[in-house]
Amino acid sequence: MSPTDDFTKIKVGKFTVGIVGLQEALEETAQKEFSSDEEIADHLLQVLKKKNYVPPKSEADHARAFLREYKKFKGEPFEMEKPQGLEVKILGPGCPNCEKLEQMIFRVMADSNIAGDVEHVRDLTEIANYGLVPTPALVINGEIKSSGRLPQERQVIQWLKEALEDQYIGESK
């Protein structure tokens, strides 16, 4: 297996980062006994720091993200981190409508001068984490806004602006 074979993108704080060796670390950790989530998080942090650069100031964020990925791996309930910044996901294996939705999102965000993290999720296992969702689906800040169809551009703009407003209101509380 080459080093790039086990490369996984995960959300750490407000950033999407690539982690080498995550799958192997999760499998190895699942074989051990730990008495707390903190021990699991610390173990994963120590193992994964050997293959990945983890800035000292973000170790706590990485440990939380690694624990979240571990719980997903084990099929245990986990807390989704509240998105920091605008997070847009297109769910779909790559069908023509999925690709059209992705291009629409990039165009709408560029034309409206809206910045955010856009990810096209093609992995069927990850899509299944959202439940039984017809594709293409549009997820904005963790909320499914559209599924099984291409939404109108004006509706997408409205959803994006509402998500930004909700975030701004939430930060000012």
Image (tube, helix red, strand yellow):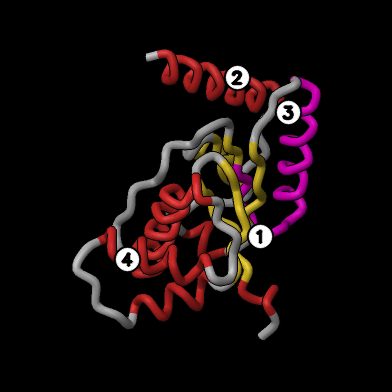
- Inspect the image, locate mark 4, and give the three-letter code of the amino acid beneath it: Ile
Q: Nearer the viewer, mark 1 or mark 3?
A: 3
What segment is highlighted magenta in the picture?
89-112
Q: CA distance from mark 4 to mark 1?
A: 32 Å
Q: In x, y percent, where is residue 131? A: 43, 54
For disc 3, the marked residue is: 109
Q: Which residue is label 4 attached to?
A: 40
Give the quarter of the image for residue 123: bottom right
Dot placed on the residue nearer the N-terminal end, 3 or 4: 4
Residue 88, image x, y percentages: 60, 38
Q: CA distance from mark 2 to mark 1?
A: 27 Å
* Residue carrying label 2: 161
Q: At x 76% / y 36%, what residue is drawn?
A: 106
The rendered magenta stretch, by its main secondary structure, is classed as helix
In the image, what residue type sits under mark 3?
Met
Residue 109 sits above or below residue 7 on the image: above
| Label 2 SS | helix
